[in-house]
Image (cartoon, rainbow, N blue to C red):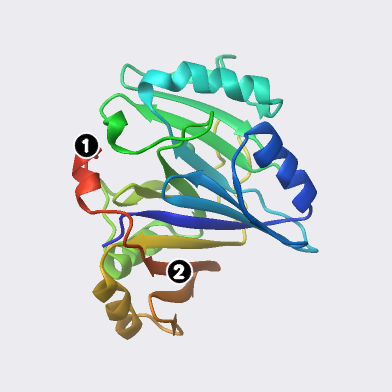
Amino acid sequence: MITHYADLELQTVSIQGIKQAYADSLQLPILYESSHFIRFQLTPFTTLSFKETYEAIHPVHFAIQVPYSQFISISSFIHQSGLFILKQENGQYIDETSTRKNLYFRDGDGNLLEIIAHEYIKENQVELFGQLKGMYLREIGFPVKSVPVFRDWLKSTLKMKTERDQDTFNFVIGGTAHAVVVSKERPWIPISMKALPPKMLVTLGTPNINFVKKLANTLDNNSLESDKIYFSKEGYNFCVKYSSDFEMSLLKELNLPL
Ligand SMILES: [Fe+2]
């Protein structure tokens, strides 16, 4: 099964601009850097990568889970970072219910980032670093033509799950990884941003090497390497990778609902 997002690789037209946003402003450690590629450590189990390209960028939406008890201080850090914070419809920056808080902001490329915290998630299960204190990459947005078709493919092929099925917006979940499957017609909150499908390579982690091998039999046009498999669906590039560092037991310890 899928336990987490291991890497999110996006396109950019400026590695230098990306470096200013993620290394200087958000203070994420750089793991690797070349003239056309950069990789940051985003959370203990997830890296965030950017590849320089000469084409228009479609902004992506992704959300980082942070500890509920530290949400306000992490929000202040983002306010002080100089990145552009977005207001909710009511004019407030933080949106909150009795058990969930979130805040939306943008990087220099216009990507729509979010920090989100839930009261029920147990906080002390992963070692947090830096001032962003990301626990895991929770959400990546996938605008698609048909939500049911893509959702059902994620469920049948990657064995991801839903709490309930909806037609224009659906969380499809594998451990900590939430695919936010939305209709292209449904704009992203809180700025009603057009949901253009971004070019990206999404690497999903599994602690089961046999899961990777089994996918080779079920997926069309896949490319299998020793511990990972590459394939595409709906214009999105995927990789499923065996990750021995993420223990299945962590899912229970985090108190995830699914
Ligand atoms: Fe979100």
The reply to whether residue 68 is in sight is: yes
Mark 1 and ligand 1: say if the CB distance to the nearest ligand atom is below 8 Å: no
- Residue 15: x and y in percent read 75, 52
- In the image, residue 10 sits, relative to residue 22, either above or below, namely below
Choose between 144 and 63: the one closer to the eye.
63
Three-letter amino acid code at disc 2?
Cys
Q: Which residue is mark 1?
A: 255
SS at badge 1: loop
181 w.r.t. 129: above or below: below
In the image: residue 87, left or right of residue 256: right
Q: Are marks 2 and 1 in contact (CB under 8 Å)?
A: no
Q: Amino acid at mark 1?
A: Asn
Q: Secondary structure at mark 2?
A: strand
Q: Position of residue 130 (x, y in %)?
A: 53, 33
**Number of the label disc, if any, that sits on residue 239:** 2
Task: Tell me which numbered mark, 2 or 1, is placed earlier along the sequence.
Answer: 2
Q: Nearer the viewer, residue 202 or 157?
A: 202
Q: How many dots with numbers?
A: 2
Residue 89 can be seen in this image: no
Q: Position of residue 212 (x, y in %)?
A: 32, 74
The answer for how far apart the CA atoms under marks 2 and 1 are is: 26 Å
Which image quarter is the N terminus in? bottom left
**Residue shown at 36% from the left, 59% from the top:** 151
* Residue at left offset 50%, top offset 49%: 141
For the point 67% across and 26% down, the residue is 81
Q: In which quadrant of the rendered image does the C terminus lie? A: top left
Q: Residues within 10 Å of mark 1 (few under 14, many from 20)?
A: few
Image position, residue 107 (x, y; %): 68, 38
